[in-house]
Image (cartoon, rainbow, N blue to C red):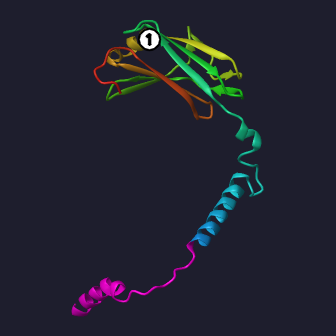
Amino acid sequence: MKRFFALLVFSLFSSALFAQNEIGPDGDKLLWIFAIVLILALAFYLLGGTGKKPRFSIKSIMSRRRLSVELKKDRVYFPDTLTLTVKNTGNVDVDLDKPLLIFDSFWLKRKFRIKGMQNRSFYPLYLVKGKSHTLEIDLLPFYQHDKRLKRYSKVTVRISDVKGSRLGQCSVYLRKFLIKY
């Protein structure tokens, strides 16, 4: 035990006792070599150097899938209908999945998929670049389904691609709420 304690004390103070002016290795060159190898490996992986189909191409990098999502209500508080407008502002066509309607209270969330309107189902929807799509969402069927939804203060509509990637969302407040979240 005494040896261990003596070794511990010696190792703690040895750097201060035996200080010398030594020149360390050139760490800059090692970091540059590591960064270059990492960049080459990443480029090899992204450009599909394994002989398979490339993951990314110049066309996929230059194409942008972008949507502008707008949600309007017919009244300031306690609206009956919401108007969803989705415009394709990107430079490629987009295949939209069913919108997700989220009723949000501070602690609870209820999620619904919107299939269409007036007993017509028209999703998935192919939206050409520069075009827009408008959907009227009647809230009364949701309130008839669950009476507690009238107490929820916020509604969010989330738009996603058929493959599952999120493209945009928009929120509106249905009633006054003390805390803005």
Whether 13 is drawn above or below 143: the answer is below
Residue at numbered disc 1? 139
- Which percent across, then down, holds residue 50? 74, 58
Residue span colored magenta: 1-27
Can residue 93 be seen here? The reply is: yes
Residue 27 position by quadrant: bottom right
Task: Tell me the residue at 69%/61% (across/down).
Answer: 40
28 over 92 or under it: above or below: below
Q: Name which residue lies at 34% across and 24% down.
A: 180
Q: Nearer the viewer, residue 99 or 4?
A: 4
- Which class describes the residues within 10 Å of circle 1: few (<14), some (14-19), or many (20+)? some
Q: Is residue 23 above or below residue 154?
A: below
Q: Nearer the viewer, residue 110 or 71?
A: 71
The number of numbered discs placed on residues in the rendered structure image is 1
Kindly state the secondary structure of the residue where label 1 is placed. Answer: loop
Residue 121: tell me if it is visible.
no
Residue 160 location (% of width, % of height): 57, 29
